[in-house]
Amino acid sequence: MISRVHNKEIKIFYEEIDIDLPEQILNNIKENWKKIEKEKSNVWNGKVICIADFIENDEKVEIFCRRTDYAHYLYDERIGLPQEYRCKNLSAGCILKTLDNYLIVGELDELTSYPKMLQIPGGNIDKSDINGNVVNIIKTINRETLEEVNIDLENKELVSNYKISYIFKPDVGEVQGMQILAVANLNMTKAEMENYYKEYYKYLGN
């Protein structure tokens, strides 16, 4: 379910504590990760921000997070865990809209965990996005958009404006994590954006 939050204050808090999982579940997660590594050698079991609690009212959204890892997330998504041990990670992305009303999406590589899946620029929270116990989700969105499509959201020559507008929340019983979505209006047409990204892609290949 996607809800509109463009007029709400968003606060995200992070506690540097690992989620406590029973030993048998931890062993199952480790064995599953070994199988994934054999199938896809380029996967990386990094830290994942996991949502512990979520509060929303008419004025604000508050999200409280803890720490787990990607192996836990994938195990829960593909095999499943009891409700109290599920991993719902927090990520963020940006919907880029061109002057002629096209949206920018990308296709994930064959060797990723989700081959051929379409998605907007975005990703998980990084340590650099956390100051004390507060997560700067705008920083996450800016960093991921710059890394993936070379768009600096603060560059007024490229972007006329942007704002956090939506939150994707899984329905009860679903495993997927929550994603905070900004919308950015580009100062480029579809054709101009295609040429801009082609140049960036060449740069990445060098």
Image (cartoon, rainbow, N blue to C red):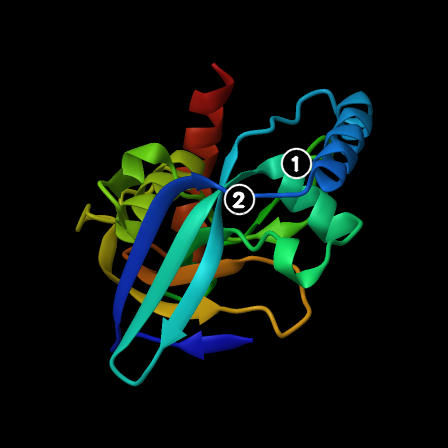
Residue at 48% x, 29% y: name it.
201
Residue type (three-letter) at the residue carrying disc 1:
Ala
Residue type (three-letter) at the residue carrying disc 2:
Ile
- Residue 37's place in the image compared with 10, above or below, is above
Q: Do we see residue 168 in this rendering?
A: yes
Q: Which residue is mark 2?
A: 19
Query: For this rendering, which residue is in front, 33 or 142?
Result: 33
Q: Are marks 1 and 2 in contact (CB under 8 Å)?
A: no
Left or right of 47 on screen, residue 132:
left
Residue at 27% x, 45% y: name it.
139
Q: Give residue 75's quadrant in the image.
A: top right
User: Circle 2 — which element?
Assistant: loop
Left or right of 13 on screen, residue 17:
right
User: Circle 1 — which element?
Assistant: helix
Residue at 69% x, 43% y: name it.
74
Residue at 78% x, 25% y: name it.
34
Q: Which residue is mark 1?
A: 71
Query: For this rendering, which residue is in front, 28 or 191?
Result: 28
How busy is the neighbourhood of tag 2: few (under 14 within 10 Å), some, or many (20 plus)?
some
Query: For this rendering, which residue is in front, 151 or 86?
Result: 86
Which residue sits furthest bottom? 58
Q: Earlier in the sequence, mark 1 or mark 2?
A: 2
